[in-house]
Amino acid sequence: MKKPALLLTLVLVVAIGTALFCSYWLRSAKDYDAVDAPLNLKNIAQRVSEKNREYRKSTFWWSTAFHGSLLLAAFLSAASGIILKVESVGANREKFKKDVAAIFAGSAAFLLTLSGTLNFSRKWESNRVAAYQSENLLYQISSSSSNDLPRVYQRLQEIVARQNEGILGQEPVPANNRNEPSTAKE
């Protein structure tokens, strides 16, 4: 097997493996049912479960974007240096090697700039925290009394607002400054 075919095979195996892992991870994440919730809290428990699922998927995709761009940028940076240094591959193609190295280095810089400018890490962290908080709210709902409906709605609104503030990069606004009574203990 020639070197380009071996490299292409390796890239395809890694890409297929990554796709299978992503598919498995998204499907295997536990979904929470509203079975344990008091009767009048089942609707809000279903809504919290939907938000939790949404936050977990967003966490996965932002994590993939953040970590993937960092890893790919590191790979491209290293590859651009290696291409220029290796003399046995493409010995009679110096211009081609320089062009490929420049493309790799430019792509690495672009990925790092994109990740930093679009704040992939902040969006990943914000969704991760929201998923954690909504999961905890589901546990609280299962042990709540049936008259806790206003408190549960208020807590869900706080989670959604904080997740949105995190995505936008805003400082969290205290609940009592949003014209909402705050009962959450922090």
Image (spheres, helix red, strand yellow):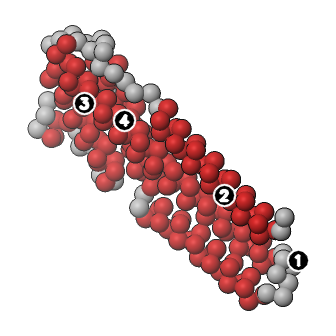
Q: How many marks?
A: 4
Identify the residue shown where x is 26% and y is 26%: 46
Which residue, given by chain and number where applicable, does mark 4 sit on? 53
Image quarter of the C terminus: top left
The three-letter code of the residue at mark 4 reads Arg
Whichever of callouts 3 and 2 sits on the residue coming sooner in the sequence is 2
Which residue, given by chain and number where applicable, does mark 3 sit on? 47
Which residue, given by chain and number where applicable, does mark 2 sit on? 12
Whichever of callouts 1 and 3 sits on the residue coming sooner in the sequence is 3
The residue positioned farthest toward the front in the image shown? 1
How far apart are the alpha carbons under marks 3 and 2? 39 Å
Horizontally, residue 96 falls left or right of residue 29, namely right
Q: Is residue 114 visible?
A: yes
Q: Is residue 182 visible?
A: no
Whichever of callouts 4 and 1 sits on the residue coming sooner in the sequence is 4
Q: Secondary structure at mark 1?
A: loop
Image quarter of the N terminus: bottom right
Q: Nearer the viewer, mark 2 or mark 4?
A: 2
The residue positioned farthest toward the left in the image shown? 179
How far apart are the alpha carbons under marks 1 and 3? 61 Å
Whichever of callouts 2 and 1 sits on the residue coming sooner in the sequence is 2
Identify the residue shown where x is 24% and y is 42%: 161
Whichever of callouts 3 and 4 sits on the residue coming sooner in the sequence is 3
Which residue, given by chain and number where applicable, does mark 1 sit on? 88
Crowd around label 1: few <14 · some 14–19 · many ≥20 (10 Å): few
Q: Report the front residue among 165 and 5.
A: 5
Crowd around label 3: few <14 · some 14–19 · many ≥20 (10 Å): some
The three-letter code of the residue at mark 2 reads Leu
Crowd around label 2: few <14 · some 14–19 · many ≥20 (10 Å): few
Q: Report the front residue among 166 and 152.
A: 152
